[in-house]
């Protein structure tokens, strides 16, 4: 399951790189044809990159929520849940040992 999620994310990243290259190529063509200035192309490129960054962050949040939801439905314990439980057990063992000391 984790491999599928990784492969999907890497495919998305690969597509983003190809798309960015195509966008830059298109902007360069518009500059060469005189339809855009270099400054306009640069500003447009920056805007597109920023939009992509924002969308990537949104996708990461959504993917994380989806993944956590799948783990919850599968009754899989997360590391945070495990660590919290381990801390509780350690604290209870400490209290038990104080209350009933032994030679161990």
Image (cartoon, rainbow, N blue to C red):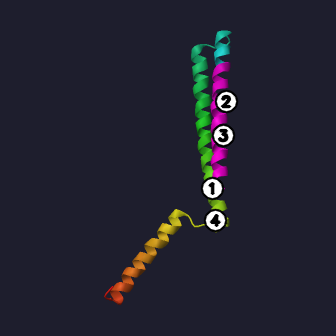
Q: Examine the structure image and report whether residue 94 is included in the region drawn in magenta.
A: no
Residue 12: numbered disc? 3
Quick one: SS at disc 1? helix
Q: Is residue 67 above or below residue 40?
A: below
Please tell me whether the stretch drawn in magenta is mainly helix, strand or loop.
helix
Where is residue 69 shown, x and y percent of the image? Answer: 65, 61
Q: Is residue 50 above or below residue 86?
A: above
Badge 1 or badge 4: first in the primary sequence: 1
Quadrant, the C terminus: bottom left
- How far apart are the alpha carbons under marks 4 and 2? 35 Å
Q: Nearer the viewer, mark 1 or mark 2?
A: 2
Instruction: Find out whether the residues at labels 3 and 4 contact each other: C-beta distance under 8 Å.
Output: no
Magenta region: 1-26
Which residue is located at x 65 percent, y 10 percent? 32
Q: Which residue is mark 4?
A: 72
Where is residue 51 shown, x and y percent of the image? Answer: 61, 34
Q: Which residue is mark 1?
A: 65
Q: Which residue is mark 2?
A: 19
Which residue is located at x 65 percent, y 20 percent? 25
Quick one: SS at disc 3? helix
Where is residue 37 shown, x and y percent of the image? Answer: 61, 13
């Amino acid at each position: 399951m984790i491999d599928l999620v990784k492969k999907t994310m890497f495919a998305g990243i690969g597509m983003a790189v190809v798309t960015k290259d195509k966008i830059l190529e298109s902007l360069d063509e518009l500059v060469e044809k005189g339809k855009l200035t270099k400054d306009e192309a640069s500003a447009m490129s920056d805007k597109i990159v920023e939009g992509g960054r924002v969308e990537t962050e949104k996708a990461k949040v959504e993917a994380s929520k989806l993944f956590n939801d799948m783990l919850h439905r599968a009754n899989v314990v997360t590391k945070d849940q495990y660590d919290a439980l381990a801390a509780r057990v350690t604290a209870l063992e400490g209290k038990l040992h104080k209350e009933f000391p032994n030679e161990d």
